[in-house]
Image (cartoon, rainbow, N blue to C red):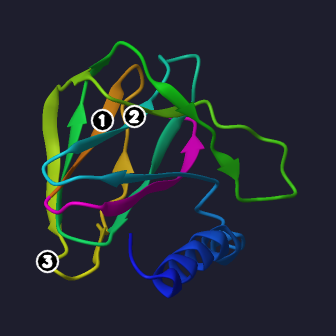
């Protein structure tokens, strides 16, 4: 973990993020997962999109923040036996809509096809990676955002801001 000031600053940034996006009509939902990893350990952030006819199509941007260096990989068509659910919030507080896309984290997964990769941070620098790519996710697929820490005590925040629409 960083200093007390760093942790407060990061927490404040996380609290403010949905307020900043509240007026953005392109962003409908937000989900976030925070974890602390040791060196060379891995966190798996799961995004499951229901089948055609059951769900709308989600698309949006992933963002990963960390206290130290890490590598990031996004996989499509993965198998997850057990995961812990993470709820998403509707950024439009005047809307009662809920997302059909579900989220979670898991300790064991079978990875599918790698579709994106990035590196963030340095040996002693805070890392942040937000790709400008607006990923349009495939219905009936499970995605895994695999984050591998390159330092001990690395606090990582993974988030996905997205909206859903009909094809």
Q: Are marks 3 and 1 in contact (CB under 8 Å)?
A: no
Element type where label 2 sits in the image = strand
Q: Which residue is mark 2?
A: 46
Q: Which residues are magenta?
A: 150-167
Q: Position of residue 36 (x, y in %)?
A: 37, 54
Q: Which residue is mark 1?
A: 144
Label drawn at residue 132: none
Measure how far apart labels 3 and 1 are at the Cα level. Answer: 23 Å
Q: Are marks 2 and 1 in contact (CB under 8 Å)?
A: yes
Q: Position of residue 158 (x, y in %)?
A: 41, 55
Name the residue rendered at 36%, 31% in the picture. 138
79 left or right of 41 in image: right
State which quadrant residue 149 falls in. bottom left
State which quadrant residue 117 falls in. bottom left
Decide whether the magenta segment is chiefly helix, strand or loop. Answer: strand
Label drawn at residue 122: 3
Q: Earlier in the sequence, mark 2 or mark 3?
A: 2
């Amino acid at each position: 973990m960083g200093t007390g000031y760093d942790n407060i600053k990061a927490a404040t940034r996380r609290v403010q993020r949905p307020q900043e996006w509240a007026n953005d009509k392109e962003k409908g939902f937000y989900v976030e997962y925070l974890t602390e990893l040791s060196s060379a350990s891995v966190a798996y952030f799961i995004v499951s999109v229901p089948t055609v006819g059951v769900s709308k199509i989600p698309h949006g941007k992933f963002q990963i923040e960390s206290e130290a260096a890490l590598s990031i990989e996004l996989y499509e068509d993965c198998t997850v036996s057990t995961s812990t659910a993470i709820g998403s919030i509707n950024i439009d507080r005047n809307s009662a809509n809920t997302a059909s896309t579900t989220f979670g984290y898991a300790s064991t997964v079978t990875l599918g096809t790698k579709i994106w990769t990035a590196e963030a941070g340095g040996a002693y620098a805070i890392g942040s990676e937000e790709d400008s790519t607006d990923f349009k996710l495939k219905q009936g697929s499970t995605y895994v955002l695999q984050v591998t820490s390159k330092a001990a005590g690395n606090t990582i925040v993974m988030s996905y801001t997205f909206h859903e629409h009909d094809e």
